């Protein structure tokens, strides 16, 4: 750590305190005087991250930073990235774990055949996907909800996920707003009580798979 700190330009009189501060931040202070060969793979990864952030760089470039980590460590790394971003560090990172990207990235780039085919935030990506064609509906009082919703124009199918919660798939030509309004009116008329109703938005993984299948962001 001392060598990396000096190479990063940390003043000698600040080096010891900065090392301790960074190891505490990574939750590995107890490893400070242990040999790297005595550490687990996950701890070695944390040491590497500590070396990378010790001098609080303005730009941090990371390749698969959470790969191989246990869930607790992945969560800690993601919180760290958010903190660094709030402090002004720009972070570029690549990952095949798309849920992690969705959790923390402000802007997302999709690479295909070595070319950057899209850059934007999640909302911009979703706006280029075909309008949501599924709804999740929760009922606090269910009076024949499945049969009622299946009769609404524009509804393709209704699936009961758990008691009181349905997934409703719209027909391809169905308008989301019109079908949603029809479902609400039909349920209320039948005596059901609606707790919530929301479109089922695609995840980053679904967007990416759709891109691979079609070759374009649609």
Image (spheres, rainbow, N blue to C red):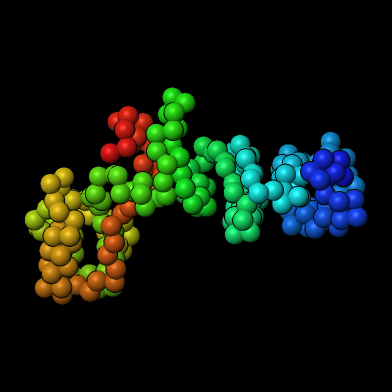
**What percent of the width, then of the height, locates residue 10?**
82, 49
In the rendered view, tell whether residue 165 sits above or below residue 26. below
Tell me what residue is drawn at x 83 percent, y 52 percent.
Answer: 19
Which image quadrant: the N terminus? top right
Compare residues 101 and 5 and report the one nearer the observer: 5
In the rendered view, tell whether residue 214 sits above or below residue 140. above
Q: Quadrant of residue 21?
A: bottom right
Task: Indicate left or right for 145 with 20 as reference.
Answer: left
**What percent of the width, then of the height, locates residue 95?**
54, 38
Q: Quadrant of residue 214?
A: top left
**What percent of the width, then of the height, locates residue 105?**
50, 50
Farthest residue to the top: give it.
113
Tell me what residue is drawn at x 28 percent, y 57 percent.
Answer: 199
Task: Indicate left or right for 191 with 100 as reference.
Answer: left
Q: Is residue 199 visible?
A: yes
Compare residues 209 and 121 and report the one nearer the observer: 121
In the rendered view, tell whether residue 40 sits above or below residue 174. above
Q: Is residue 43 visible?
A: no
**What percent of the width, then of the height, locates residue 158?**
20, 54
Tell me what residue is drawn at x 31 percent, y 33 percent.
Answer: 216
Task: Indicate left or right for 190 with 161 as reference.
Answer: left
Tell how many labels.
0
Tell me what residue is drawn at x 57 percent, y 41 percent.
Answer: 93
Which image quadrant: the C terminus? top left
In the rendered view, tell whether residue 134 sits above or below residue 60. below
Compare residues 72 and 122 and report the one nearer the observer: 122
């Amino acid at each position: 750590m001392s060598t990396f700190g000096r190479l990063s330009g940390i003043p000698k009189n600040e080096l010891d305190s900065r090392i301790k501060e960074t190891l505490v931040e990574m939750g590995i202070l107890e490893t400070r005087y242990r040999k790297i060969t005595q550490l687990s793979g996950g701890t070695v990864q944390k040491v590497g991250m500590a070396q990378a952030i010790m001098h609080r760089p303005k730009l941090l470039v990371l390749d698969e930073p959470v790969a191989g980590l246990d869930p607790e460590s992945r969560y800690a790394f993601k919180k760290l990235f958010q903190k660094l971003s709030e402090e002004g560090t720009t972070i570029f990172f690549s990952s095949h774990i798309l849920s992690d990207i969705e959790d923390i990235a402000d802007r997302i780039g999709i690479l295909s055949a070595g070319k950057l085919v899209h850059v934007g935030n999640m909302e911009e990506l979703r706006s280029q996907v075909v309008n949501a064609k599924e709804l999740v509906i929760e009922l606090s009082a269910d009076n024949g909800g499945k049969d009622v919703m299946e009769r609404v124009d524009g509804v393709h199918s209704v699936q009961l996920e758990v008691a009181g919660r349905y997934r409703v798939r719209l027909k391809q030509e169905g308008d989301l707003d019109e079908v949603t309004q029809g479902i609400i009116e039909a349920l209320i008329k039948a005596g059901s009580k609606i707790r919530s109703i929301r479109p089922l938005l695609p995840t980053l993984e679904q967007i990416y798979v759709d891109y691979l299948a079609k070759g374009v962001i649609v």
